[in-house]
Image: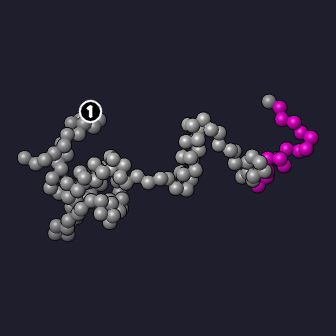
């Protein structure tokens, strides 16, 4: 009998083989990832594939190793760009610190006006 792991998902019990090989398209469909994502994993050496008569198959043992390594956080990276900014703001909020507002202290707002020149000099703000 082939090696397998038991998976319980959405109330159904199923066996996922961990030895042998399986078509890449089927693996991508089952995991909900694109073929391009899978090829990136292959290019980085995270999974092993084999070409059999022109059809590409993935080694299921390398896929099980990938899952184990991913679960330990081996492939995680810090966010970059806008995700980095929002994650830092979220972390500051969770620590009880207040993040500065983007329009405070004379910084430009989206409309190109500063906070001080958005209101006339003699106006007051009421609730």
Residue 72 lies, in percent from the top left, at 33, 47
Q: Determine if residue 39 is in view.
A: no
Residue most extreme to the top: 127
Magenta span includes 48: no
Residue at 16% x, 67% y: name it. 52
User: In the picture, residue 47 is in which quadrant?
Assistant: bottom left
Residue placed most toward the observer, 47 or 112: 47
Residue 66 visible? The answer is yes
The furthest residue to the right: 122
The x and y percentages for residue 95 are 57, 37
**Position of 69 compared to 107: left or right?**
left
Q: Quadrant of the C terminus?
A: top right
Which residue is found at the position 89% from the left and 39% from the top?
123
Magenta stretch: dominant secondary structure = loop
Question: Within 10 Å of the Cα at label 1, are there few (<14), some (14-19), or many (20+) other Cα atoms?
Answer: few
Residue indicated by mark 1: 11
Quadrant in the picture for residue 10 = top left
Q: Please check the rendered image and state whether residue 120 is part of the magenta-colored stretch, yes or no.
A: yes
Is 5 on the left or on the right of 84, as rendered? left
Q: Which residue shows up at 75% across the image and 46% down it?
A: 104
Above or below 126: residue 39? below
Q: Which residues are magenta?
A: 112-126
Of helix, strand and loop, which one carries label 1?
Answer: loop
Q: Indicate the position of residue 101 as horizontal and vertical percent values.
A: 69, 44
* Residue under the image location 28 percent in, 53 percent down: 66
As drawn, is 110 to the left or to the right of 48? right
């Amino acid at each position: 009998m082939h090696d397998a792991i038991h998976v319980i998902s959405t109330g159904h019990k199923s066996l996922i083989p961990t030895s042998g090989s399986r078509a890449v398209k089927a693996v991508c469909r089952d995991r909900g990832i694109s073929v391009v994502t899978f090829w990136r994993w292959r290019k980085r050496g995270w999974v092993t594939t084999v070409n059999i008569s022109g059809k590409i198959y993935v080694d299921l043992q390398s896929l099980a190793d990938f899952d184990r390594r991913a679960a330990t956080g081996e492939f995680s990276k810090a966010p970059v760009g806008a995700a980095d900014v929002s994650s830092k703001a979220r972390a500051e909020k969770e620590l009880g610190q207040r993040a500065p507002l983007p329009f405070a202290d004379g910084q430009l707002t989206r409309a190109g006006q500063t906070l001080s020149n958005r209101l006339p000099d003699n106006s007051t703000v009421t609730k």
